[in-house]
Amino acid sequence: MRKAAAKSNVESGCACLARDVLDRIGDRWSVICILHLGEHEVLRFTELRRLISGISQRMLTVTLRDLERDGFVARKVKPVIPPHVEYRLTPLGRALMENVRSLCQWANDHQDAVRRARESYDARALQEVST
Amino acid sequence: MRKAAAKSNVESGCACLARDVLDRIGDRWSVICILHLGEHEVLRFTELRRLISGISQRMLTVTLRDLERDGFVARKVKPVIPPHVEYRLTPLGRALMENVRSLCQWANDHQDAVRRARESYDARALQEVST
DNA sequence: CGGAATCCTGCACGATACTG
DNA sequence: CAGTATCGTGCAGGATTCCG
């Protein structure tokens, strides 16, 4: 959901909506990053990369930069060779993580309901085709 | 975030994450639809269209269909001419709305913090360029 | 090690036109 | 009124290569 992040945030009549924050939650990689950082306190770039199997190195860079830019993640560079960079949640980031956590909780609890609704919907749609 | 909805939901090692639900929350139109339906109990297609200024009629169709498919929205067609279609939240949809609401609340409360973080980040980035 | 730069592709979404 | 069908396109995001 990086995509929406670029969109002009001019909202409908619905005023705020705080798209900025919702976008991060809609972004798959951001959520995973936040959850991992919530569990490990501090992580290096490559450690995160290993934890999040499937992420391209570019997306990890971009995701972390955005999270840092929004004040959710703190990035600390130790000027040594080879480079040593640490990432951790800021207090704001931790607050966000709490929300994400409870939301994931709710989502999991109702995941089955969604799956069933989807299956029955698809089944009905299929029937109409055969009609 | 309709985009991610098409993605294979094979998650990393992080197991669940209930991407299905998070995607809806990341989707701008879905959130707006849900909030409006939460306020009006029942709405017709065109009423929603007017409430959500800026949405294309195609996106409203697609968004509503997805929400219905996932069991968040109920669609009732009255077979008259001209057609009369009503949309309302299901119990599951209302539950989702509660979450969305409180999340928006939190987002609004911290929107300023994010904006400030962003500005200071951008300011620093600009400085380095001029260096 | 932790990125930045570049290229390439698919698909999300808007605009437009047509229908029962 | 409430959609569906079709086309055009911008840009998100993966793969690859190079760098301090």
Image (cartoon, coloured by chain):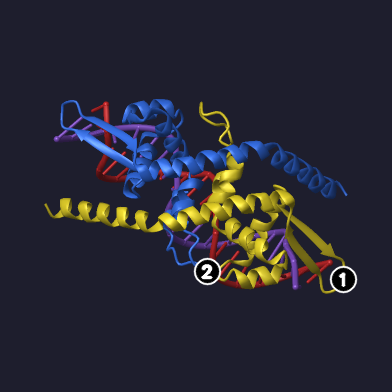
Chain colours: A yellow, B blue, C purple, D red
**Residue type, mark 1 in image:** Val
Q: Which residue is mark 1?
A: A80
The residue lying toward the viewer, choosing from B39 and B44, is B39
Q: Nearer the viewer, residue B17 or B99?
A: B99
Query: In the image, is residue B40 above or below residue B67?
Result: above
Query: Could you say which disc has been placed on residue A91 in the image?
Result: none
Q: Which residue is mark 2?
A: B12
Name the residue rendered at 48%, 40% in the picture. B98
Image marks 1 and 2: residues in contact by CB distance under 8 Å? no
Amino acid on which disc 2 is placed? Ser
Asked whether residue B9 appears in the rendered view, the answer is yes
Location of residue A45 in the rendering, given as x and y in whole percent from the top left corner: 71, 67
| Side (left or right) of B60 relative to B86 | right
- Pointer 2 local density, CA inside 10 Å: few below 14, some 14–19, many at least 20: some
Is label 1 in a helix, a strand or a loop? loop
Please report, as a chain letter, where disc 2 is located. B
Image check: B44 left or right of B115? left
Would you place residue C20 above or below residue B50 in this image? below
Q: Are marks 1 and 2 on the same chain?
A: no
Give the secondary structure at mark 2. Answer: loop
B78, above or below A115, in the image: above
Residue A1 visible? The answer is: no
